[in-house]
Amino acid sequence: MLTNLQQQPADALLALIKLHNADPRADKIDLGVGVYRTGDGDTPVFRSIKAAEAKLVAEQDSKAYLGPEGDMGFVEALMPYIFGKDTADMGGRIEGMQTPGGTGSLRLALAMVKRAGYNRIIVGTPSWPNHAQICADLDLDVVEFNHALPSGQTDMDALRAALADAREGDAILLHGCCHNPTGIDYTNEQWDEIAQLIADAKILPILDLAYQGLGMGMEQDAYGLRRVLVAVPEALICYSCDKNFGLYRDRVGALYAMVADPADLAKVMSNGHNLARANWSQPPDHGGAAVRLILEDEALTAQWLAELDEMRKRMRQVRARLAAAGTAGSVDMTPMGGQNGLFSIVPLSKDQVLSMREKHGIYMAGSGRINVAGLTMGNIDKFVAAVADVTA
């Protein structure tokens, strides 16, 4: 009966990695895979993580099961950074659990809303491809609205229209910061309006905070999420440590639920635990434990935040250099200077993306999405010249 399964298409980004690795050109550039890179092109382990791992090896006395909720010390240590030090539990209305990365958190959140009776998920497009893929696998309907305008601004009119058309049983999935794939974020003033619109529509917000600290800073990047939580009675928050702690392969994430009545919190979280047990049983411990040790140690916390500052400053330098290039062929690079996080979209056709790869050895997603951390002060000029060449 296994022969009844249908061949599935290969993941486009994974295929791109293979093509890049097989390219013999010394000056090739990989702008596809979504990991941070230093100015030398490396993706190192954080120094703070190395120190925490050494401490973990020395002090951990068991590998026994933790349960489907994972390391609750890790979950609780993150809360002041996500929700604010003074309102971390919103009066006993918020609780969380550990998940295998941000993807695990999103899968769990969407499975919970499905079980709770929600039918439709409102999503701005373009979005991270796995958002739609998880919804499809759970048989949830996706209602799309346009996220950004060609000018590089968010399309607030489209969002307003989507929320005006929302109905009971809907949820809305929003990127908390560093939008993937556009890098185009809502302003604080827009978040103020969005929070009220969601409250008025009486729908459930699902907030995906996968890149906190990589945009404008830990506090600034949490503004939108916190503003929405003040305005609504219930929400689900999906969190990833893969990027801001560099723990990609260790799969470190968390899911938080906020409820209107603290008395309902245990019931809600019991469903999260039940769904986790059926999916992955229990999350991997190592990465979450390392994060917990960092956040429990003042010196390690300071070291981690300094490393995060280094990452953010480098990406802002790259964006500033791209913006300074002005127009490359028919592409205006200046909006990239005001965008946030790892990603931006270069408005290229599929044929132009193919020309970038074949003619110039520059590898990027077919959508035109680039990982700006793949650019360095040594290869930006080559990239800009290649864009100008294929769009001339």
Image (spheres, helix red, strand yellow):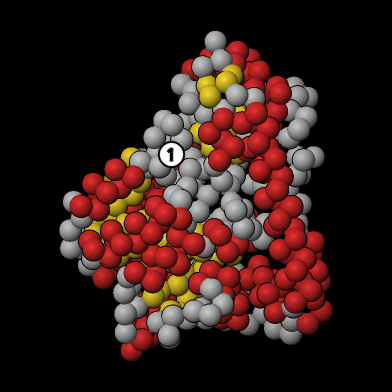
Residue situated in front as seen by the camera: 22 or 128:
128
Residue at (40, 82) in percent of width and height: 93
Is residue 322 toward the left or the right of residue 46 in the image? left
Residue 108 spot, x, y in % from top left: 41, 66
Q: Residue furthest top?
A: 392
Task: Please tell me whether mark 1 sits on a helix, a strand or a loop.
Answer: loop
Residue 146 spot, x, y in % from top left: 33, 40
Q: How many marks?
A: 1
Is residue 330 toward the left or the right of residue 48 in the image? left
Q: Is residue 23 visible?
A: no
Residue at (60, 24) in percent of width and height: 326
Q: Is residue 212 visible?
A: yes
Q: Quadrant of the C terminus?
A: top right
Residue 59 spot, x, y in % from top left: 78, 82
Q: Which residue type carries mark 1? A: Gln
Residue situated in front as seen by the camera: 360 or 167:
167
Q: Residues within 10 Å of mark 1 (few under 14, many from 20)?
A: some
Is residue 64 toward the left or the right of residue 256 in the image? right
Residue at (60, 53) in percent of width and height: 216
Rendered view: 207 above or below 356: below
Residue situated in front as seen by the camera: 146 or 99:
146
The quadrant where residue 79 appears: bottom right
Residue 58 spot, x, y in % from top left: 82, 79
The residue under label 1 is 153
Q: Residue furthest bottom?
A: 263
Residue at (49, 23) in percent of width and height: 348
The quadrant where residue 261 appears: bottom left
